[in-house]
């Protein structure tokens, strides 16, 4: 089934990822979407909160049943789909910050949270959670993130119809997911780099589970990892955050 062909719209929930996970475990088919007007326990990466003010943003999760393990590419294709959908909706080219941030200028416009469930050595489902700030005014963000968050309304100075963005998001997600299914790994990594806020060759610091590591950014690997060159050696990072970028 195509992504977006079946949409489960709800008024409120803890997290659309949790609802989608329950549905996936009960056998719901690939492509089904859960969208909520608000989330009371929206989640971001690294256990952070995702503030989900009622009817201000898009909070949705897509159930996928990818046939192979390479789910590290899923947040990347979701990011690419959102950049296309935003461009088709309001003509703005937003940027991506590996692995899961949607960026405008230096501010965060949204994020992706991809969570997988396994059955033995096989992937049973993947939940692709997408959060996009649409009609937030400054005061709709909690104070602690106000300086670093933005919304489509704050950028365009106009109220946005989230349905227009959603109508553009379904074909974009289907397009990028079909490229993922066709194993176009290199092309996905290359498109991600083209839309990335991070230019090749930049000196960066990554925060990893085992501490900070600095080096030269050498791009995105076709498996979805970030390649960093440090002391002449290239290393791939699947789970890290970009902390600083030298000018
Ligand atoms: C991040 O940038 O840290 C990821 C944010 C992901 C937020 C979305 S909103 C819909 C889905 N449900 C959640 O609880 N999180 C994701």
Image (spheres, rainbow, N blue to C red):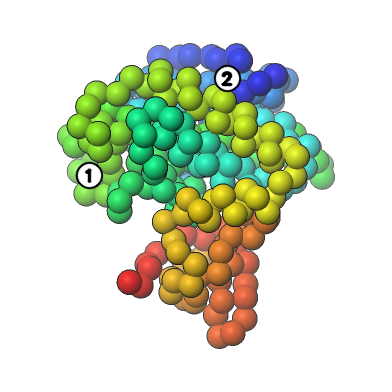
Secondary structure, mark 1, is helix
**Which quarter of the figure has residue 11?**
top left
Crowd rating for badge 1 (residues with CA inside 10 Å; few <14, some 14–19, many 20+) = some
Q: Nearer the viewer, mark 1 or mark 2?
A: 2
Q: Is mark 1 within 8 Å of ligand 1?
A: no
Camera-nearest residue between 116 and 245: 245
- Residue marked by disc 1: 146
Secondary structure, mark 2, is loop
Camera-nearest residue between 130 and 169: 169
Numbered tag placed on residue 112 in the rendering: none
Q: Position of residue 134 (x, y in %)?
A: 32, 29
| Quadrant position of the C terminus in the picture | bottom left
Q: Residue at x 73, y 38 (%)?
A: 181
**Which quarter of the figure has residue 178?**
top right
- Horizontally, is 81 left or right of 110 in the view? right
In this figure, what is the number of numbered marks? Answer: 2
Vertically, is 80 above or below 199? above
Residue 150 visible from this viewpoint: yes
Q: Residue at x 55, y 85 (%)?
A: 231
- Residue marked by disc 2: 4
Q: Position of residue 155 (x, y in %)?
A: 25, 38
Residue 72 visible from this viewpoint: no
Q: Residue at x 58, y 19 (%)?
A: 4
Q: Residue lying farthest right?
A: 121
């Amino acid at each position: 089934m195509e992504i977006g062909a079946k949409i489960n719209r709800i008024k409120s929930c803890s997290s659309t990822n949790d609802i989608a996970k329950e549905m996936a475990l009960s056998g719901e088919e690939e492509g089904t979407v859960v969208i909520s007007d608000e989330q009371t326990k929206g989640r971001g990466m690294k256990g952070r909160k995702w503030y989900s003010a009622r009817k201000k943003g898009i909070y949705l999760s897509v159930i996928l049943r990818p046939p192979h393990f390479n789910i590290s590419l899923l947040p990347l294709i979701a990011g690419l789909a959102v950049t296309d959908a935003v461009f088709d909706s309001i003509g703005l080219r937003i940027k991506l910050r590996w692995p899961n941030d949607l960026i405008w200028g230096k501010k965060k416009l949204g994020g992706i949270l991809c969570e997988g469930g396994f059955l033995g050595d096989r992937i049973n489902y993947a939940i692709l959670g997408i959060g996009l700030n649409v009609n937030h005014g400054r005061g709709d963000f909690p104070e602690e993130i106000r300086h670093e968050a933005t919304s489509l309304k704050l950028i365009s100075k106009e109220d946005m119809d989230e349905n227009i963005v959603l109508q553009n998001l379904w074909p974009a997600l289907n397009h990028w997911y079909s490229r993922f299914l066709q194993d176009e790994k290199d092309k996905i990594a290359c498109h991600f780099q083209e839309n990335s806020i991070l230019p090749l060759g930049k000196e960066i610091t990554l925060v990893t589970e085992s501490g900070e590591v600095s080096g030269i950014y050498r791009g995105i690997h076709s498996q979805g990892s970030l390649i960093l060159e440090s002391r002449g050696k290239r290393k791939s990072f699947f789970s890290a955050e970009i902390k600083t970028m030298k000018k």
